[in-house]
Image: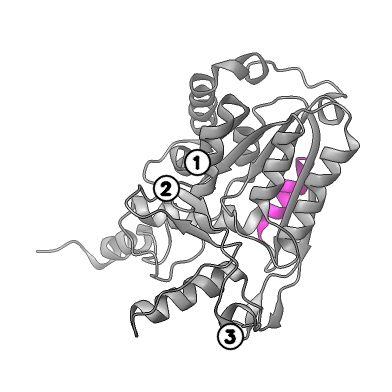
Amino acid sequence: MGPPATVKQAVNASSPPKDVISPMSYRTGEDRNLFFLVKLINDFPEDRRYLVNPMNLTTHNDNPAGIHVFVDASNIFIGFNDQLKFTRNIPRMRHMQQADMSFDSLALLMERRRPIAKRALVGSKPYVSAFDKAKAVGYECSILDKVYKARELTDRQIYFKELERRTYGRSTKVAPPSSAVVVSAGSPASKVVIGNGSGSGSETNTPQYAKHAWVEQGVDEVLHLKMMESIVDFDEPSTMVLATGDAAQAEYSAGFLKMAQRALQKGWNVELVTWSKGINGQYKELARYWGEKFKIIWLDDYAEELLDM
């Protein structure tokens, strides 16, 4: 004989909806915060003196020698939900209610209580609660409207679109345009080579467009501008923390990868905070070339701590 109807209803009521991502382990707020802090101290021993220091001086968030933090919100938030699905064996394309990210936890991971010179976050609507938290902890937030347009494809996008068409259609040799990023034959997938051909097909000379859609416009470029302002306005190079995985050329600028390269060439240290499944392979090449000057921090290791409860 089964349980009374009232008990069944209580059990069903306590079960989370199927389209909602739930925490894999439950802790009280205090326990979660303590566990996360200890984890950061262990993972970043070089910043322990900041992480364990309870004092926050008035100059802490306006220190000319402090770090500069830049957040590509769309890239990080989308990657967050993709990572949560992956760890729960949920198909990436399955529709789920968007999980809320704890921005104060993200900020602690990126900043690790080091002195701050500049904070900037750029994203697009719809507005999410994390944007309010970002403002509350001191980030300059630029949240732009999406626009309905047919976006012109970059040379790289045209090249791979044409390569795919010819691969699955007729067999014809395709010459990559000068800005295309090509995976070297017979090398690991992360090995990338910048093509330097001039391109011979008419496809690269005639503008091509994607289908009309609601898309971001100018979001990446605003963050690129803020990064360049730091490079130009501060006489002494510091550390630039960049939260993104995107390295592609933007619609109106050269992209985050180029901005990171410029910072490194000007003597800055760069920390890339990113998801392993969303990172462009060129960043790994950058890390190999620059060594300790360019560090990659994998968000995958902290996904559960970033889930807002």
Q: Is residue 309 visible to us here?
A: no
What residue is disc 2 on? 190
Res. 163 image quadrant:
bottom left
Badge 3 local density, few (<14 within 10 Å), some, or many (20+)? few
What residue is disc 1 on? 284
Residue shown at 78%/22% (left/top)? Answer: 56
Please report whichever mark, 1 or 3, sits nearer to the chain's N-terminal start.
3
Disc 2 is placed on an element classified as loop
Badge 1 local density, few (<14 within 10 Å), some, or many (20+)? some
Q: Is residue 179 visible to us here?
A: yes
* Tag in front: 3 or 2: 2
* Disc 1 from disc 3: Cα separation: 32 Å
Q: Is 100 above or below relative to 252?
A: above
Q: Is residue 186 left or right of residue 77?
A: left
The amino acid type, in three-letter code, at marker 3 is Lys
Asked if residue 306 is among those painted magenta in the image, a careful observer would answer no
The amino acid type, in three-letter code, at marker 1 is Lys
The reply to whether the C-beta atoms of the residues labelled 3 and 2 are less than 8 Å apart is no
Magenta stretch? Answer: 128-138
Disc 1 is placed on an element classified as helix
What residue is disc 3 on? 211
